[in-house]
Amino acid sequence: MKRVLLITDGSCLGNPGPGGWACILRYNGKKKEIFGSEPRTTNNRMELKAAVEGLRALKEPCEVEVVTDSQYLKNGITQWIARWKRNGWKTSTKAAVVNQDLWRELDEQVARHKAEWAWTKGHASHEDNNRCDELANTAARLQTASG
């Protein structure tokens, strides 16, 4: 299996508001940047979207280290999702899981790969995370300009 590094970030101008997501894929000395935006969304949705799109871009099953600055994303996929699925996509308070559509997509993408999840402090010394932040913010601002 190929070993890939996936770095992700999401951004939102207002919450909700125009949002952007970005990811960087690194494999065998190569780097690919992917980003996009949505007109009205939330920061958490953009964090999820970045991970979904990064994993979706992989054409074959891979060993993937996913680096995120979102505790929501990391904890959701590593701690909470199994319980949500067992409970019919309900939280412990019986409420519907927020962003369920993207959690389901992420779950499908993760099932294709062997994924490890790592957290990094946002806006700190992680060069690729900082670049993702820049790309996600630019995508969100472009959404504002085009909307």
Image (tube, rainbow, N blue to C red):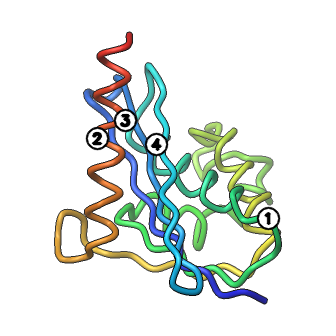
Check contact, mark 3 vs mark 2: CB within 8 A.
yes
Q: Residues within 10 Å of mark 2 (few under 14, many from 20)?
A: many
As displayed, is residue 114 above or below residue 139?
below
| Element at label 2 | helix
Tell me the residue at 48%/57% (across/down): 33
| Element at label 3 | helix
Q: Nearer the viewer, residue 146 or 93?
A: 146
Pointer 4 residue: 46
Which numbered mark, 3 or 4, is in the foreground of this view? 3
Q: In the rendered image, which quarter contains the N terminus?
A: bottom right
Q: Earlier in the sequence, mark 1 or mark 2?
A: 1
Q: Nearer the viewer, residue 2 or 111?
A: 2
Q: Earlier in the sequence, mark 1 or mark 3?
A: 1
Pointer 2 residue: 137
Check contact, mark 1 vs mark 2: CB within 8 A.
no
Q: Earlier in the sequence, mark 4 or mark 1?
A: 4
